[in-house]
Image: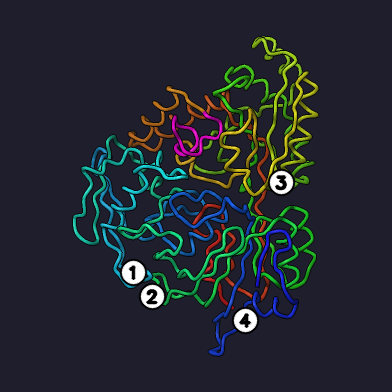
Amino acid sequence: MGLNRRGFLLGGGAALGALATGCASAGGGTSIDTFSAVFKGSGADEGIDPGVGHLFIDEARNKALYDGLFEVDDTMRPVPRLAESGEPNADGTRWRIKLRDARWHDGKKVVAADVLYTLARVLGPAGPQPFIAASTLEAVDLTQSRAVDDRTVEIALSRPSFEFLTALSAYGTRIVQDGAKDFDHPVGTGPFRFASFQRGKQLVATAYEDYWDGKPAIARLRILSADTDARLTALRGGQADFADDLTPAAATTLRGSGGVTVNSTPNSGIYYFAMKTDRPPFDNPDVRRALMRMADRDELVKVALQGQGEAANDVFGKGFEYYADDLPQHTYDPDEAKALLRKAGAENLTIDLFTAPAASGFVEAAHLFAEQAAKSGVTINVRVGSGDTYYSEALTSGQLTMGQSGPLPIPNHFGSRLLTGSPQNRTDWKDPEFDALYGQALATSSAGERAALYHRMHEILYDRGGFLFWGNASWNSAASSDYRNIPAGVPNALDWARFDKVSR
């Protein structure tokens, strides 16, 4: 039976229901034969290599197949997973990680060599896609790191870091087996064992009976790729049991439907424009400052997010540790924007904005922002690309792009997106002062002193950064009311998209 993202499932209606709907097994109780979860698809950009995946659907699939040493909870603080504990030495240059008793899907025990191999892979030569955690883990000194015994690894760092457990919870840090090279048919440690994968369509996985955190009740898990309308249709029609990242309108529609439970997590959909700071006109900080004054954020939230969100303020991580909540709200001020453009010698500016229907509201926000910028004498040409390849193209394309993020620990946001050479540096931001402050913060053992350094970094971004964060939306997901323990956590956190505890 075939799949596509727009039409979702192809085939006879009777077969669809039998294939996609979870049902009690012959043994009764809480067992579920098949559970189907549908996520926002991205076609050819999707994958199941845990070292390079950067999409929400990639993370959902990798979470089913693999574990990290640590993951963050809903407050963005690290909690142990494959690790039982992690302790630094006095100066934060060595971390001793104790592994739990866990097994790979082929029955082998998880050992320290697997951790060292994963680190070496991430820090080694990049392939066609960069390793997401390469900059986050850049301080790891592999030559001095060692296996103390099979269940204890000592990780040496080239410079101190008292945030290292947070770094070990970042995207791209899930542990792979020592020597693994085939990620088309992966062997993981996660709650589900790989069965098949079709890029842009579906992952099929089966319950791993020896999972260290307990065998899942779901015997067969399908994680499906579909666009916005298809996710709603699939859930309402019984072709899926769970749907992620629903639009405000879809969530409202489902709240009025019987048999469906909707969950909304505030401050979890973070919307932004990304200015390429390495090229004109955004290599001039006054132009970046001007753009921040051109955005009527309240109107963007009202129109593009259908009023279900709140204005953002050009710094990341509202509601989470280290967020700079004392910075005055940037306001819509076309006259101030004009003055800044005159100062920059950039009046009558024309900018290309590259967007795509890659997330709800993107295209609407792009056109509305073009109207707002016109009041400051700026012409924005909106160029609409393909949602299937948008995020990879947007890394290098154009002057101005768009994006949506879930929450991350602020140190991981800085490390993966804003350091010189970061693999997901969507603004091409290179700032020696910023880089130095980041290193200083990691080396500071006092949480209060670290917070002050991170605050200074936020002040730099608030003043002259390349991100224009304009909206914080709720993250909407929904599931059939037939199930219990449906994941409803903060995106990118431990409890989001985790299906091993779902039951009847």
Q: Position of residue 390 (x, y in %)?
A: 63, 43
Q: CA distance from mark 4 to mark 3?
A: 34 Å
Q: Quadrant of residue 163?
A: top left
Instruction: Find disc 3 in the rendering and name its residue.
Output: 357
Foreground: disc 4 or disc 3: 3
* Secondary structure under the numbered disc 1 in the rendered image: loop
Answer with left or right where residue 295 lies relative to residue 328: right
Residue type at mark 3: give it. Pro
* Secondary structure under the numbered disc 3 in the rendered image: loop
Q: Which residues are magenta?
A: 415-428
Residue type at mark 1: give it. Arg
Q: How is the image coloured?
A: rainbow
Residue type at mark 2: give it. Asp
Residue at position x 71%, y 46% in the image: 357
Instruction: Find disc 2 in the rendering and name its residue.
Output: 210
Answer with left or right where residue 92 lies relative to residue 401: left
In the image, residue 399 above or below residue 206: above
Going from N to C along the chain, the mark reached first, 4 or 3, is 4
Q: Which mark is residue 103?
A: 1
Going from N to C along the chain, the mark reached first, 2 or 3, is 2
- Mark 1 near mark 2, Cβ–Cβ under 8 Å? yes
Instruction: Find disc 4 in the rendering and name its residue.
Output: 23
